[in-house]
Amino acid sequence: MKHTVISKTAFTLLACVAVVIAAATFVEDVRGTAFVKEQVYSAWWFRLLWMAVALTGAWQMVRMHLWHRFSVCLLHLSFLIILAGALTTALTSRQGMIHLRQHVPVAVYMEEGRVVEPLPFTIELDTFYIDYYPGTEAHSGYTSVVNVEGETSAISMNNILRQDGWRLYQSSFDEDLQGSWLTATYDPWGIGITYVGYLLLAISAVLLLIDRRETFVRLLRHPALKRGLVAVALLLWCCTALALPVVKRQQADALKREQVVYGDRVVPLNTAAIDFVQKLYGKKTFHGLSPEQVVISWQLHPRDWRDVPILQVKSKNRILLQQLRLDGPYISVNDLFDDTGHYRLEELYKQEFGTHSKLEKAILETDEKLGVVLMLERGTLYKPLPQDGSVQPLSQSKVEAELLYNAVPFSKILFMVNLTVGFILFFMLLWRLTRAKASAGKPQRIIGRIATVLLLCAFLFQLSGYILRWYISGTVPLTNGYETMQFVALVTMLIALLLTSFSLMGGRQRGGLSALVLPFGFLISGFTLLVAWLGEMNPRITSLMPVLQSPWLSSHVSLIMISYSLFAFITLNAIVALILMARKKSEAQVSASLETITVLSRLMLYPAVLLLSVGIFLGAVWANVSWGSYWSWDPKEVWALVTMIVYGIAFHRQSLPWLRRPVAFHLYMIFAFLTVLMTYFGVNYLLGGMHSYAG
């Protein structure tokens, strides 16, 4: 009884941690970061709560004799070391800001609350400069050239200076470019202890997946994976224009390859024109006119085009049309001004400012569209490529690659195809499962092979678009929400193809696996591409922010995105399991299918959680390299940790007997996926934070 109480206490405390930090993100959104850091993250009771989790967890390790299971013991030990490192950092580290002005020696730093503390060295700013992307005003990096104890060093984003145990990071700068702000941190013990924990975590993750005595390998050999009915296992993997002065199509097409400086890149005119028309009209073309025709014609005849109803007002913003007494869904630029030339949105915005109402959002969206029009008319939307050689032009191959990428709507085509095929396969499978004597006959095998070929074609099509984007941008496409959703879709289809290959190689024993994997692959990839296409995530290719110019980016993001794909598979598995549970449990087919689903979900849970954990802590290392703190309790960090805790609890079937019941396990998996949705979407759109640049 005593052991049971301690076990329940340990998991109750861990659940309390998850609830507290999740709630803190919403409190932070209302009361501010400083309030939450003081009242929660730095509070004595919060540290005491973590210590209680560590102590009860350590007792569980002793009680269950985990030293006999080396990989499991190492995993739990790594978390204890990470917590010990975090506590050491909290108790012994120092952090503050150093403000430098040119040629002014500084030997102090400012802690929070403007407390001035001495430094063990003197630092002086020689020069500060900003690097720009060629021909643009977009920052590619910030650099402070400083003199410390007679030695000159350069400090920039992702390039720190170490001096006398202190680490100095480029943080900000003065508007006159004569001053610089550095983050100074001193953490002699905490970082080392924490990094040891990270290393042990990575090692234990690999060992857990290859240790023949552990659950993951045993699940791979489970009899349920060898039955023909394994198909249930992975189920849901699931023209007004004619009256306008318009340049001829032939003339406009001749200019589409013309290179211009747009945003922070050199691009063909076609890219800037598409962005302009899509921003205003919601489509790439306008009444049969190409984007180049619209842009060039507007530049030549702005007065005529200002009368054209081309500004789209979405259905969610109809309240704005009511206020302006206009009909929609398209309005003209001149509709936004009265007879005296007064801007009609100005008074409305003053009334709605700070209310966060639908009307305020509608005003801002429409005002943004007008701003784009004004930039075009003033000649600042894009600029001709300088002829003095100061900006490197694109190679002809890159121009053609970008034109091809612009011409082919990869996401739109694939989400329509994948969802259509996915739903057809899904309902066919449900029909089979609801028939008492359903079997995988020759017609089903033929359908499975056709679907496999279709999925392979979809994967190659998506991969070609992804590689094109990579080639055009010159960086791995993992820098914003649109690109990460593309990556998730790609990984999902790859996982489905690999599992289908595993099924085909298994012959009759595992031959039915493809009938379940394929709907999952089509549906999950289809929905992620649909979200990317419909959502507010920006498909525009841009140069990297300075903080993102790091080799840690691709590994951190890709590992987490792969884990999210696996969590999605597990969730759809759970939905199918619950559908089957609605049937009579006495049916042998249903019973076997449920067992298979549960085994496969538990199997996928291992790589999913381990990849998430490693990805989170790689991100922590990146954060430490970039701005001097490996954990800042940013909302995205917090919800990633909540996700790891929630899914991690699911491994402890021995301590939590209710997880052994299939219905409870699958319900818990559906609940757990809500934390994934909150981490990826909820934080971006509701809470913000340092990670908002990736949204």
Image (cartoon, helix red, strand yellow):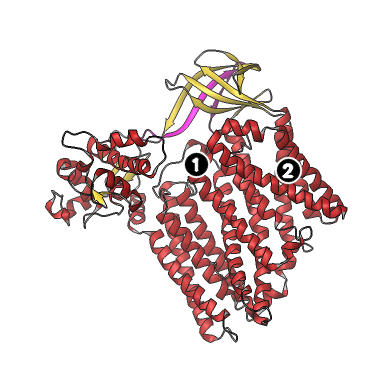
| Mark 2 vs mark 1: in front | 1
The image shows residue 167 at horizontal and vertical percentages of 63, 27
Residue 109 position by quadrant: top right
- The residue most toward the top is 104
Q: Distance between the residues labelled 2 and 1?
A: 28 Å
273 vs 352, left or right, is left
Q: Residue at x 15, y 52 (%)?
A: 248
Q: Which of 682 and 345 is in front in this view?
A: 345
Q: Residue at x 64, y 53 (%)?
A: 611
Q: Is residue 446 magenta?
A: no
The image shows residue 599 at horizontal and vertical percentages of 69, 68
Q: Are marks 2 and 1 in contact (CB under 8 Å)?
A: no
> Which amino acid, by three-letter code, is at mark 2?
Gly
Q: Is disc 1 placed on a helix, strand or loop?
A: helix
Q: Name the residue under label 2.
A: 197
Label 2 environment density (alpha carbons within 10 Å; few <14, some 14–19, many ≥20)? many
Using the rendered image of the protein, determine whether residue 133 is visible from the camera's viewpoint. yes
Q: Which of 229 and 510 is in front in this view?
A: 229
Q: Residues in magenta?
A: 133-157
> Which amino acid, by three-letter code, is at mark 1?
Ser
Residue 183 position by quadrant: top right
Q: Mark 1 points at which residue?
A: 692
The image shows residue 502 at horizontal and vertical percentages of 61, 71
